[in-house]
Image (spheres, rainbow, N blue to C red):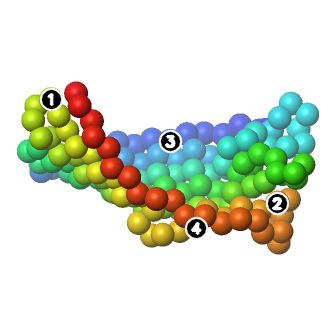
Amino acid sequence: MGEGGSNLQVQQPLPMGFGFQANMTYYAEQPRLCLGTHPLVGTSKITPTWSATTRTSGCRPRIAYTYRSHYLVGLDRSSAENQDNYGTLDASVNVNVTPNIALTFDALNLTDNLLKYYADNKTRRGRSMRTASSSTLVCA
């Protein structure tokens, strides 16, 4: 079993409608399955996120940076498949069209980083792929 970890979060409003949020999860040792040989699927040792936002009448932009250290994705042909360290910069804008309808525009992976996968170790590289941007219509 893993040794445990901690999670720290700070959220602070600033003058003139600005604000920031930061959080970080850290495991001293990655949590492992009950037999202790393989880490839990999807668990990174370090995962920080920083974001900044502002509120103006009818519009709320936000920018965020997230980093994840490598983690186990699952099995691929009986070999452990891992995702390599990954950082991404994302942005979103919420626009109130009416008091009951808001449009949300999301731009993901602005730095155009690749998701890189590898087998048991980083010298056995696997596939790579890019993420895409999206937009969403939200009706309240």
Q: Which residue is mark 2?
A: 119
Q: Is residue 12 visible?
A: no
Looking at the image, is mark 3 or mark 1 earlier in the sequence? 3
Q: Which residue is mark 4?
A: 114
**Residue in the image at 68% along x and 43% along y:** 42
Q: Residues within 10 Å of mark 3 (few under 14, many from 20)?
A: few
**Residue in the image at 90% along x and 42% along y:** 37
| Contact? badges 4 and 2 (CB < 8 Å) | no
Kindly identify which numbered label has been placed on residue 91: none
Residue 123: percent from left, percent from top: 82, 72
| Image quarter (top left, top right, bottom left or bottom right) of the N terminus | top right
Establish if 41 lies above or below 71: above
Residue 84: percent from left, percent from top: 68, 61
Q: Is residue 87 left or right of residue 81?
A: left
Q: Which residue is mark 1?
A: 100
Q: Secondary structure at mark 2?
A: loop
Looking at the image, is mark 1 or mark 2 earlier in the sequence? 1
| Contact? badges 4 and 3 (CB < 8 Å) | no
Q: Secondary structure at mark 4?
A: strand
